[in-house]
Amino acid sequence: MNFDNSYMQLGESFYQQIRPTPVSQPKLLLWNQPLADTLGMAESVQQDNHLLAQYFSGNKLPEGAESIALAYAGHQFGHFNPQLGDGRAHLLGEIIDTQNVRRDIQLKGSGPTHFSRQGDGRCALAPALREYIMSEAMHALGVPTTRSLAVVASGETVYRERPQPGAIVTRVASSHIRVGTFQYFAARNNMSALEALVDYSIQRHFAHTDLRDENKILRFMQQVMQRQINLMVEWMRIGFIHGVMNTDNTAISGETIDFGPCAMLGVYHPGTVYSSIDRQGRYAFGNQPLIAQWNMARLAEALLPLIDRDQQKALKQIEPLVHDFSHQFEQAYFAMLSKKAGLTDANAESIEMVQHLLTAMQTLELDYTQTFNRLTDSLKDESIASALQQQLGDWYQQWRTKLEQTDDNLEHQSLLMRQYNPLVIPRNHHMEAVLSECIDTGSMQAAEQFLQVLRSPYSPTQYTAQYQDLPADNDRYYQTFCGT
Ligand code: AMP
Ligand code: MG
């Protein structure tokens, strides 16, 4: 592996240099060969399971790795904590991949650090597997996300509500810079570090922005926001509920990060919450764009002193930008929803049409993914069309008429809908069944088969149909927990 570690050059206030704590019996459970290939990992290494288990448990550092735990702060459920940081993760370093993109390679569950507070620095096997499966599913769905390279069992027990097998998951990200990283330095009034972080972030993520541009902070803010808007639109497209959108879990790259209590939306309802700790519904499905905007306001706050020494003047410049989030989001959101419904342009009429559809889905308690799939299929299948006509009444006929106005053989609309509507998503009941089976049997076969299906969300595989069904109770009692 060719490491090229640039984050370390930012200086010691950005991290703690610390090695992972070795584990007793590392065993490689999942290995992402296609991802390893894009990282340019040698085949000889990839074929050596023993060596991979040593590397990706943290027992042995690969040559060129310089293990660090990153410092960051964050608003958790609205409350500011000036010091969080990697309490159970080690960044091994960065690799420039075969597409010339710089990628962080990070172990999670690899032992305590300076930032661990009360925690044991470890990760249980179920959340490690969940992160691996979910992030790979998101990637295949076309949603910006961190990815997973490996899951290694530690051979040790971790103690949560009950004893569980431990594991280490390797995360690959285009960086681990979070809104909370900026907050960390802003809270300490460390302006030189804050500015260095902005410059580093621009070089890493928005390289076309000139560092000498006097408006670079505003440009940076605008670009981070753009990526968040895109991310929210993508989450809403596929029905992803993150569950813990704290500012320390908001990557400025615009990638989905941290899959602790995440879940998928079944029956359409904007108020859907599955996380057991989210009692107020702060991170409910339909609230996510609003929270993303709130998180962007926290980033803007942290950047204020870099815009102008006079806080009022700085606010005047950045506030309109953050306010515009909702407008920009709405536009992108309705453009996406229109396409999900096969309508190419999002004009007032198509927006009203998709809004009515969402209301109908909510009142009739229809499954989000399945309804869009049935609408897609109904263009080619008369029996599905008449069933939908029964279910959705006049709306269905109006929708068909509108589609036929643009193109009467419906070929184009059909293709568009297929692109925007996955056949299969990592449904909660399947995820839970797969995790239980893997943990009970010790075999990863169930995870591998699930992954095979999830890696092809827009075209059916041999097993796809097995994972499309809805949960018996519509996930009414489903709950997720923070992956600690
Ligand atoms: P998360 O909810 O996973 O985003 O984590 C929030 C904070 O808690 C981060 O600073 C984590 O590093 C820390 N943390 C979570 N779990 C553990 C653990 N088992 N040991 C130490 N720190 C942890
Ligand atoms: Mg986190």
Image (tube, rainbow, N blue to C red):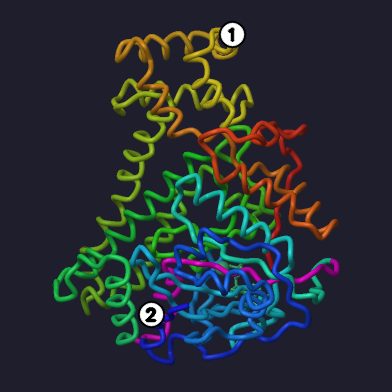
Is residue 370 in view?
yes
SS label for mark 1: helix
Does residue 123 lie above or below 344 as drawn? below
Indicate the quadrant containing the C terminus: top left, top right, bottom left or bottom right: bottom right
Q: Is residue 346 magenta?
A: no
Is residue 283 in view?
no
Which residue is located at x 62 percent, y 42 percent? 453
Q: Residues within 10 Å of mark 2 (few under 14, many from 20)?
A: many
Residue 445 image position (x, y, % from top left)? 74, 52
Which residue is located at x 48 percent, y 65 percent? 247
SS label for mark 2: helix
Q: Which numbered circle lies on residue 383?
A: 1
The residues colored magenta run 162-190
Mark 2 CB within 8 Å of ligand 1: no
Horizontal relation, residue 117 to residue 394: left or right: right
Task: Name the residue beneath numbered marker 2.
Answer: 186
- What amino acid is labelled 1 in the image? Ser
Residue 134 image position (x, y, % from top left)? 60, 53
Closer to the camera: disc 2 or disc 1? 1
- What amino acid is labelled 2 in the image? Ala
Residue 270 image position (x, y, % from top left)? 55, 38
